[in-house]
Amino acid sequence: MKILLYFFILSQLIFSQVDYNKYFENKTLRLDYFHTGDKNNDSYSFDELKSEPYWGGSHKNLLDTFDYGTYKFIVIDEKSDKQIYSHTYSTLFQEWQTTDEATKTIKTFSETVVFPFPKEKVRVEFYTRDKKTNQLKKKFEYKINPQSYFIKSERNLEYQNFQVHYSGDPAKKVDIVILPEGYTAEQMDKFKQDCKKFSGYLLNADPYKENADKINIWGVAAPSKESGTDIPADHIWKKTILNSSFYTFDLDRYVMTSDNKAVRDLAANAPYDQIFILVNTDKYGGGSIYNHYSVCVSDNVYGEYIFTHEFGHGFSFLGDEYYNSEVAYNDFYPLDVEPLEPNLTTLKNFDAKWKNLVDANVPIPTPNEVKYTGKIGAFEGGGYMTKGIYRPSLDCTMKSISVNNFCKVCKNAIIKMINFYSE
């Protein structure tokens, strides 16, 4: 009986896999849409469809197995009504909703989802997570005929890509594309050198170091008209290819861009799973949004820390573990539900987090005392809050300015994500 049960479960797993070649071509369909709302409401509206030449994602793991991010989209084959692709993500709009401005006005952001180009008609369903319960609720759907002549194939911002670190077939690797921001044509050699430098930073950190053979890193040689980026408080405005700016949400170190189309147009020059924007400045700053894009400055003394810290957000949905720095958000984590981030907990459902990694002699909650250095526990303070949110260790790259210092919980989350993309 046990043998029969084993083969039944195995067959269910096998047949639940999506056959990539049956449903998809080896290129990308990009759906741009508008996301509009205020602090408590959001709505979607369609913008356009674009065909792009590369698909950097897995051909095996097509259904998202991580319950991460504020949003999810699902691609459904119209004929069979079968889910053939899904992906979770977050956006700049979602962060804006937690700011003071969102209580006073309505705003619209351009956003994008990408998936393998379908062979037959599909339906794309969009879900937003309820802030109080973390449950996903359907908000919008759009039907697509892949034969439609309204799907644009024209390429905007078409530039040459180059290999920074290459391990093999993009379908079996994590593909990271580094985009230049504020590098002029005369500074393209500097950008290529910076790509090598920052690639080295990432692959110097555990567990990326041990998994370097599962990672591809690409660059795109795309110059800006002017060097640097916008610094509004200093009345500095630069003509750059991605229109990035410090003082996003009026936070001086937060450098991001709301020019979603430019980011996606430029990223389309290479196969990618993750987008990293490298901004040509020595001013301290960066930012990241899960499965959207990450940002780091090129010439700051803390560049190695910024790059790996921000990629932790963008790639593995790791939360910030610090709680004593100024941020632009209000009430980012409700204390009566378990955070989705794998390295934060309210202890509401600690069993689902890293409780299995805690030694029997470590108390929960864990005192913030030196004797627990190197131990996994539940230390109060994290997620921008001093009380009610707990982190796995006394210190980590997600908490302090430190290099190659991810705790075991964060390392495990990163490894799981690497394996998902590279299988």
Image (cartoon, rainbow, N blue to C red):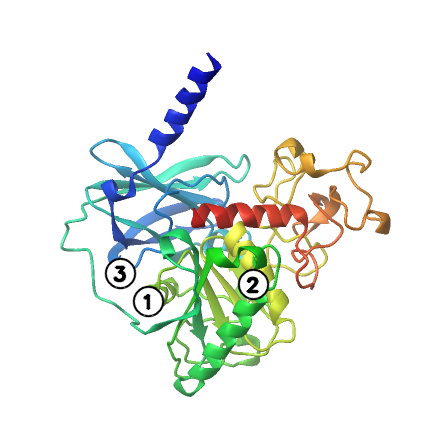
Please provide percent x and percent y for residue 98.
55, 51
Residue found 32% across the figure and 37% down from its top: 18
Residue 229 sits above or below residue 268 on the image: below
Please provide percent x and percent y for residue 214.
47, 55
Residue position for label 1: 269
Judge by depth and name the residue closer to the eye, 217 or 166: 166
Judge the density around disc 1: few (<14), some (14-19), many (≥20) Cα neighbours within 10 Å: many
Judge by depth and name the residue closer to the eye, 314 or 134: 314
**Can you see residue 332?**
no
Residue found 62% across the figure and 57% down from its top: 206
C-alpha distance separating marks 3 and 2: 28 Å
Residue found 45% across the figure and 21% down from its top: 6
Q: In this view, does 258 lie to the left or right of 354?
A: left
C-alpha distance separating marks 1 and 2: 23 Å
Residue position for label 3: 53
Residue 325 sits above or below residue 372 on the image: below
Residue position for label 2: 203
Three-letter amino acid code at disc 2?
A: Leu
Three-letter amino acid code at disc 1?
A: Asn
Please provide percent x and percent y for residue 274.
44, 58
Q: What element carries label 2?
A: helix
Please provide percent x and percent y for residue 328.
60, 59
Of callouts 1 and 2, the N-terminal one = 2
Q: In which quarter of the image is residue 267?
A: bottom left
Q: In which quarter of the image is residue 163?
A: bottom left
Three-letter amino acid code at disc 3?
A: Pro
Most extreme residue toward the top is 1
Judge the density around disc 3: few (<14), some (14-19), many (≥20) Cα neighbours within 10 Å: some
Of callouts 3 and 1, the N-terminal one = 3
